[in-house]
Amino acid sequence: MKYYLVAGEASGDLHGSNLMRGLYARDPEADMRFWGGGLMNAVYKEHQSGTGLVKDYREGAVIGIWEVFVQARKLLGRVRSCEEDIAAWKPDVVILIDYPGFNFRIAEFAHKAGFKVFWYIAPKVWASRESRIKKLKAYVDKLFIVFPFEIDYFRRKGVDFIYKGNPLIDAVDRSPALQETRGTFLDRHGLPDRPMVALLAGSRSGEIKTMMPVYLEMAARLHAMPEYANLQFVVAAAPGRTPKDYDLAGAGDYVRLVFGDTYGVLRHARAAVINSGTASLEAALLGTPQAVGYRTAPLTYLIGRIILKIKYISLANLVIDRAAFKEFLQNYMTPENLVTEVRRLLEDENYRARMAADYAEVREKLGGTGASEAVAGAMIAVLIK
């Protein structure tokens, strides 16, 4: 069968790559064509079955309402390009992976053009813009959800869905980073054997430019304290970014940059400061004590406060419906607040133990392993009915 997948950001690339492995396992002759990133492309190259990568998501990823408005013309051009490519290729199914701003347009087009449409990693209509449920019902043949709290929600809304667990557990548990010793990790990246704080600033250039100055100021203040002078701060760089994106020119040598090993950095860090997103859930599954810090354009944040209906922005906190770790949003994401919280994460063993217990509950609620393969099997079963 011919599968056309559309992922628009780093987390979608990760989940898309694992889904592709499952689809190839059950359909060895699968013809894959996709918008995604390096992880999806690596799976395609392993199998050399299909048409391959059409567009890399890193060419046009944006976040936030204001940012989308500024780049509207470019985004509309990408939508039209994707629509034209789908129409020309004529897949058996279009599989949309998260990324609602773009993918709702593709869902409407594909449905009206007569293609079967699956959506994997449900758009977060339970958080905001609930009116989009009408579009899910109208344009999506089957929704594949990944969080247990979504089950009752979509059932109440009358949306047809399939739930097979959360694929991130597989991504984390199968990572080579879990098998590597600390010594090997440090040697491979040329890092000294010193206590480490992980810094994750997001995957989009706008996020990185916003987060890094706050992170670097926090790191400088901690480094200036005698009891923390031995700390190193390791920035886990996002796929497709360059050292220039992180602008460490004025930072001390206690700040280091590591590419292509987010799980390794998180696993060997004593604490982490993370720009929300999938990475905060990954840190919870890896057991890394964390704080989430998030900033965006003032207009985006103002609108978000009006339309968001959730208590937390971090997935792990949403899964257990309480704050396993603190979230510092917008004006509260300051160097001062992060310094205070990181010190507590490093020093307070009872605080760390409570967080670990909450992490265990997060993992239990997300279910066991094998989600990606189970979803792939369910998709094929729907297609061959």
Image: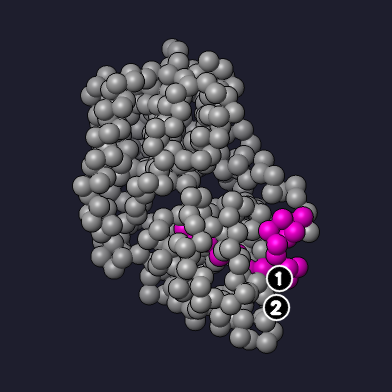
Q: Residue at x 42, y 26 (%)?
A: 33
Position of residue 315 relative to residue 334, above or below, is above
Left or right, residue 186 beside residue 219:
right
Q: Where does residue 20 sit, x and y in percent of width and height?
A: 52, 29
Whether residue 255 is visible to the viewer of this picture, yes or no, is yes
Under circle 1, the secondary element is loop
Q: Residues within 10 Å of mark 1 (few under 14, many from 20)?
A: some
Q: Give the residue type that dot 1 points to.
A: Pro
Q: Earlier in the sequence, mark 2 or mark 1?
A: 1
Position of residue 294 relative to residue 340, above or below, is above
Coloring applied to the structure: one colour
Position of residue 342 relative to residue 368, above or below, is below
* Extreme residue toward the top, this view: 385
Quadrant including the C terminus? top left
For disc 2, the marked residue is 230
In front of the other: 64 or 354: 64
Left or right, residue 378 beside residue 348:
left
Position of residue 303 relative to residue 360, above or below, is below
Q: Residue at x 44, y 38 (%)?
A: 36
Q: Where does residue 356 sit, x and y in percent of width and height?
A: 66, 60
For disc 1, the marked residue is 195
Q: Which residues are magenta?
A: 184-202
Q: Where does residue 319 sit, x and y in percent of width and height?
A: 51, 51
Q: Residues within 10 Å of mark 2 (few under 14, many from 20)?
A: some
Asked whether 165 falls inside the magenta stretch, the response is no
Q: Give the residue type that dot 2 points to.
A: Asn
How many marks are shown on the rendered structure? Answer: 2
Whether residue 173 is visible to the viewer of this picture, yes or no, is no
Label 2 close to label 1 by CB (< 8 Å): yes
Q: Where does residue 153 sit, x and y in percent of width and height?
A: 39, 42
